[in-house]
Amino acid sequence: MWTRSVIVLWLVAAVPLAAQSPTYSVGRPPTPEEIRALGSAIAPDGEGLPEGSGTVAAGREVFAAQCSRCHGPNGEGNVGPVLVGGQGTLASPRPLKTVGSYWPYATTLWDYINRAMPFDQPGLLKPPDVYAAVAYVLNLNGIIREDQVIDASSLPKIVMPNRNGFIPDPRPKTRSRKPN
Amino acid sequence: MTHFKRSTRRDVLRVGAAAGAGLLVPYRDAFALDTPGKLGAPLGPYGERSPFEKAVRWRRDTKTPETGSSFTPIQDSVGTLTPSSLHYERHHSGIPTIDPAQHRLVIHGLVERPLSLSMEEIRRLPSVTRILVLECGGNSGSEWADKTGVDVQRSYGLVSGSEWTGVPLSLLLAEVGVKPGANWVIAEGADACRMERSIPLSKAMDNSLLAFGQNGEAIRPAQGYPLRLINPGWEGNTNVKWLHSLKLTNQAYMARDETAKYTELMPDGKAWMFVYEMDAKSVITFPSGGQTLPRRGPYELTGLAWSGRGTIERVEVTVDGGRTWVNARLHEPRLPIALTRFRLPWRFEGREAVIASRAIDDTGYVQPTREALIAARGRNSNYHFNGIKFWIVRADGTVTNVDA
């Protein structure tokens, strides 16, 4: 029966290729280029941080060239948000939330500058420039000394002033019994 | 009035009946008995609403046009679905233009079989359809301030209802094989800023969707075309648009939008983080701030209610400033985590009335007052405001917010 052989052939053809997903036979392994093209997400323990390093002095130049037109020469804010100050204001009627007063992890600064800054050309900065910009903003906030070098090893070790300022959502974990 | 259709005999009879009932309608003008008919517009490939309909989103001015939010005109909404063209928007670096033939979703990290999928492959997988509410975590953020929002669009309009179609994320997680130790999924979009959020694996396994369809067509570019992560009931920002990467990890990544933003600062200086579910909420959309009742008489008071945790069981309405509450009638079907419309027949007698609604969901949660929220959380928490909104219907029929 030719119809049966067609069906058998079709079944053979439908056996998943090793690289595809087991049940629905979709996809293929991502290429290294694809992984690289994704914004490299940085974990708070530093996982994902690339090679390279930056100094406060180098960061001052990066900041002046790429950041100051929106954030002000000293991170005081302009079109972009203020980046410095505010420590000690969080419990006040007018809290000032900045990298220095609010952000719990220094790795977030690296991750965010790398993926989203400068606002109009995200992805422009190379890792050494990102490390340097991070160093400069941390120094502006009095979190690291002028001579401290920021790299994949030192960045996750920085304890931000508001590191312990967050608690998980305390609301009751209620949920309807009906599925959706 | 020459655009009316040529009258039929039945129209003539109807006019006669109206005249008999003593109506002062100049029927000859109104029905244009002696005017020939006129053809309408030809058929078109993609529909537009009537030129007489004017409801549009309202956009708060921002220093950069690529960021900000636009608010759904819920005062003009009917039913429980929001047209895709009026769905609220919140963008962080503009709306990308993405060719679905080029777009891929990469699932990687702590998985046995990392996968790169084309849109064609994703659309070929078993899919489901869900009618869901989507609300920005910052909706009604204006209400924490001394001066509350003057109209319902600007104060409660970062909420919309859609039918979403997509593939359960759990299905693809089974395909890639989640490794032991993985408990978070880092979702990243393909917008310029590559917006990312950490999603607990438990949510991803429970009911997250990889949506490609919205209201019967492909998701609109402003809503994440061609692929959006939908986390039912969770604050809008976790519903990552233009999704191109899901990374399984053993820790939350403490992204900027889950630390610096979308965290709620309490009066003691501590902040809540990973605040996901949108609690039960409702608001009267008619009559609401900025509207005017043209005359005394009967009206249908109406509004919207929703809960990120379940189904709206009841909506209570007051027309006497909160002294007494009555049950509104609810449009059916009431769906979990979806907009539910309520209505209540009401007479405006030309006397001032202070009106409000409060929602109760099927977890038993009762929408709180604004005062109760401020007492519990202070005024600096920015997000997740779900307090009761009062409107004042003035004696002359104008409607304002309470501190106008």
Image (cartoon, rainbow, N blue to C red):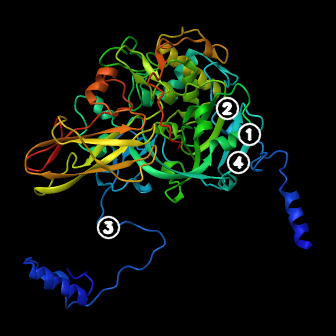
Labels 4 & 1 near each other (Cβ < 8 A):
no
Q: Is residue B358 left or right of residue B107?
A: left
First in sequence: mark 4 or mark 2? Answer: 4
Point out the frontmost of discs 1 and 3.
1
Same chain letter for marks 2 and 3: yes
Which quadrant does the C terminus of chain B fall into?
top left
Indicate the secondary structure of the residue bearing disc 2: strand
Q: Can residue A149 be seen by looking at this rendering?
A: no
Mark 4: few/some/many CA within 10 Å (<14, 14-19, 20+): many
Disc 2: which residue: B248
Identify the residue position indicated by label 3 in the image: B51
Q: Secondary structure at mark 1?
A: helix
Mark 4 and mark 2 on one chain: yes
**In whole angstroms, how far apart are the C-alphas of marks 2 and 3?**
48 Å
Whole-number angstrom distance, CA of label 4 to CA of label 2: 16 Å
* Residue depth check, mark 2 versus mark 3: number of the one nearer the observer: 2
Q: Which numbered disc, 4 or 1, marks the residue closer to the eye?
A: 1
Q: Are marks 2 and 1 in contact (CB under 8 Å)?
A: yes
The residue positioned 24% from the left and 44% from the top of the image is B151
The Cα–Cα distance between marks 1 and 3, rounded to whole angstroms, is 49 Å
Q: Dot 4 lies on which element? A: strand
Q: Position of residue A180 (x, y in %)?
A: 53, 44
C-alpha gap between disc 4 and disc 1: 11 Å
Is the C-beta separation of discs 1 and 3 under 8 Å? Answer: no
The amino acid pointed to by label 1 is Val
Image mark for residue B176: 1
Would you name the residue on which mark 4 appears? B117
Q: Nearer the viewer, residue A122 or A24?
A: A24
Above/below status of A14 relative to B210: below
Q: Are marks 4 and 1 on the same chain?
A: yes
Q: Residue at x 11, y 57 (%)?
A: B295
